[in-house]
C-alpha cells in the first residue's frame, strides 16, 4: 500500500469530495492524514472529517492548515479569478458546523508541521497528493529544507501543459494561482513530481444519468456526494459567464478533476503519463505550466486517460462502500 497525505481545498468544488472518497476507499492507499488549505482551512477540515466519517474512515486524521497564501497580498495586478465561494459545507455540515472561522489562519503551520513529521518518520515512502493550493507544502519546504529529500513523490492536480487542448481562459486554473509563491517553491524543490493538468481532467465527468444512478443506491455517502454536486451547479451559470466559457461547457456534467489525480497516483494502467520538462512561469500575470521539449525531463505529466474505465472505477468504489 502506498502511504499518502492528501492536501485539499475541499468544500468549494465538489470534485475534492469525490477525490477524498476515492482515496479513503481505495485499498491501494494508506492515508496517513488529510490536510486542508485555502480560504477557511478549519471549515474545510470539518467538511473532510464529516465525509470521511460517512465513508467509514473515522480513523484518518484531518489537520487544518493554511487559509492564506504564503505571500499576501498576491502580486500586483495578478490576474486570477477566484472560484465561487461561500457555500462551503452546505449539503454536508449542519447548524453551527457551518459557521465560518473567526480567525481561519490560526492553523497556518499545523498542516505543514504534520507533513514534515510524517515525512521524517516515513522517509522515502510518503507520497503527497495535492488537489488544492500548494500553501501547506510550500510552507513545509520553508520550515524544513530537507523535506524534498524525504518525500517519495508528489502528484499535483493543476496547470495546463498542452494549452491548445484547453482553449479556455488560463485564469480559470486555481490550484497554482491561489498561491503562486508556494507553487514556485514546489516546482523548484526537486520533489519527484507528476502533474495532472486540466486539459486531461476535463475529459472525465459524471453525467446526470450517473448521478441519478447514485441516488438509487440510497446510501449516506452517495446521497451526500450527489447533494454536493447539485449545490455546486447552482453557481456554475454565473461562473461560466464571468469566465467566458461556452454556454454548453457544463451541460449538467460533473467534472472529476481531483479524483483523476488520486487515480493517477495509484498508477493505474488506464492513465497515460509521459516524462517531459515542465517549467513554472508567470505569463500575463497568470501562473502557467509550460512544456519545454528541448530540455531534460523533470517530471511526469498525465497526458491521457481512458475516461470510461476511470469513471466506472470511481462509481464501483463508491457503490461497493455501501454494500
Image (spheres, helix red, strand yellow):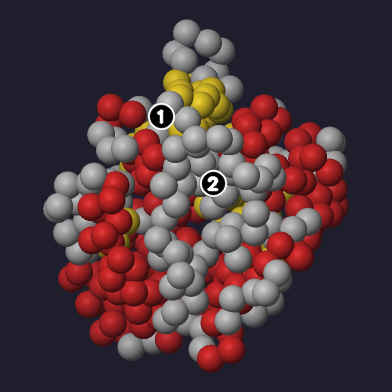
Figure check: 200 above or below 66? above
Percent position (x, y) of residue 100?
59, 76
Q: Is residue 140 left or right of residue 259?
A: right
The foreground one among 16 and 219 is 16
Mark 2 or mark 1, which is nearer the start of the sequence?
1
**In the drawing, what numbered circle is on residue 52?**
none
Percent position (x, y) of residue 221?
44, 80
Which residue sits furthest top?
294
In the picture, the quarter occupied by the C terminus is: bottom left
**What residue lies at 41% left-to-right and 65% top-to-bottom?**
14
The foreground one among 101 and 45 is 101
Look at the image and tell me whether residue 239 can be seen: yes
Q: Is residue 58 left or right of residue 243?
A: right
State how far apart marks 1 and 2 are (Cα): 18 Å
**What residue lies at 38% left-to-right and 44% top-to-bottom?**
172
Percent position (x, y) of residue 148?
76, 36
- Label 1 SS: loop
Figure check: 18 above or below 75? below
- Label 2 SS: loop
In the picture, the quarter occupied by the N terminus is: bottom right
**What residue lies at 71% left-to-right and 62% top-to-bottom?**
105
Residue behind mark 1: 161
**What residue lies at 43% left-to-right and 86% top-to-bottom?**
220
Quadrant of residue 37 within the rendered picture: bottom right
Percent position (x, y) of residue 288?
46, 30
> In the image, which is nearer the foreground, mark 1 or mark 2?
2
Quadrant of residue 171 within the rendered picture: top left
Which residue sits furthest left?
248
Figure check: 9 above or below 54? above
Q: Residues within 10 Å of mark 1 (few under 14, many from 20)?
A: many
Residue behind mark 2: 178
Amino acid at each position: 500500500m502506498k502511504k499518502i497525505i492528501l492536501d485539499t481545498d475541499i468544500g468549494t468544488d465538489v470534485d475534492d469530495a469525490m477525490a477524498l472518497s476515492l482515496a479513503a476507499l481505495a485499498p491501494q492507499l494508506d492515508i496517513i492524514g488529510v490536510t486542508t488549505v485555502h480560504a477557511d482551512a478549519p471549515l474545510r477540515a470539518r467538511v473532510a472529517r464529516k465525509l470521511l466519517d460517512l465513508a467509514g474512515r473515522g480513523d484518518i486524521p484531518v489537520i487544518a492548515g493554511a487559509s492564506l497564501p504564503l505571500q499576501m497580498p498576491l502580486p500586483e495586478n495578478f490576474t486570477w479569478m477566484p472560484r465561487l465561494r461561500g457555500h462551503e459545507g452546505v449539503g454536508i455540515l449542519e447548524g453551527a458546523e457551518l459557521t465560518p472561522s473567526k480567525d481561519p489562519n490560526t492553523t497556518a503551520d499545523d498542516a505543514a508541521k504534520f507533513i514534515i513529521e510524517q515525512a521524517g518518520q516515513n522517509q522515502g515512502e510518503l507520497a503527497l497528493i495535492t488537489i488544492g493550493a500548494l500553501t501547506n507544502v510550500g510552507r513545509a519546504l520553508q520550515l524544513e529544507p530537507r523535506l524534498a529529500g524525504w518525500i517519495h513523490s508528489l502528484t499535483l492536480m493543476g496547470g495546463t501543459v498542452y494549452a491548445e487542448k484547453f482553449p479556455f481562459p488560463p485564469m480559470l486554473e486555481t490550484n497554482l494561482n491561489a498561491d503562486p509563491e508556494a507553487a514556485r517553491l514546489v516546482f523548484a524543490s526537486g520533489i519527484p513530481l507528476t502533474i495532472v493538468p486540466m486539459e486531461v481532467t476535463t475529459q472525465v465527468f459524471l453525467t446526470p444519468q450517473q448521478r441519478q444512478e447514485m441516488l438509487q443506491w440510497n446510501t449516506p455517502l452517495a446521497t451526500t456526494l450527489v447533494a454536493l454536486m447539485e449545490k455546486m451547479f447552482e453557481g456554475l451559470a454565473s461562473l461560466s459567464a464571468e469566465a467566458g466559457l461556452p454556454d454548453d461547457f457544463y451541460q449538467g456534467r460533473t467534472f472529476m478533476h481531483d479524483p483523476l489525480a488520486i487515480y493517477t497516483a495509484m498508477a493505474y494502467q488506464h492513465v497515460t503519463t509521459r516524462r517531459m520538462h515542465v517549467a513554472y512561469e508567470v505569463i500575463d500575470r497568470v501562473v502557467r505550466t509550460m512544456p519545454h521539449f528541448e530540455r531534460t525531463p523533470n517530471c511526469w505529466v498525465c497526458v491521457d486517460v481512458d475516461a470510461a474505465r476511470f469513471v466506472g472505477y470511481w462509481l464501483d468504489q463508491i457503490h461497493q462502500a455501501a454494500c
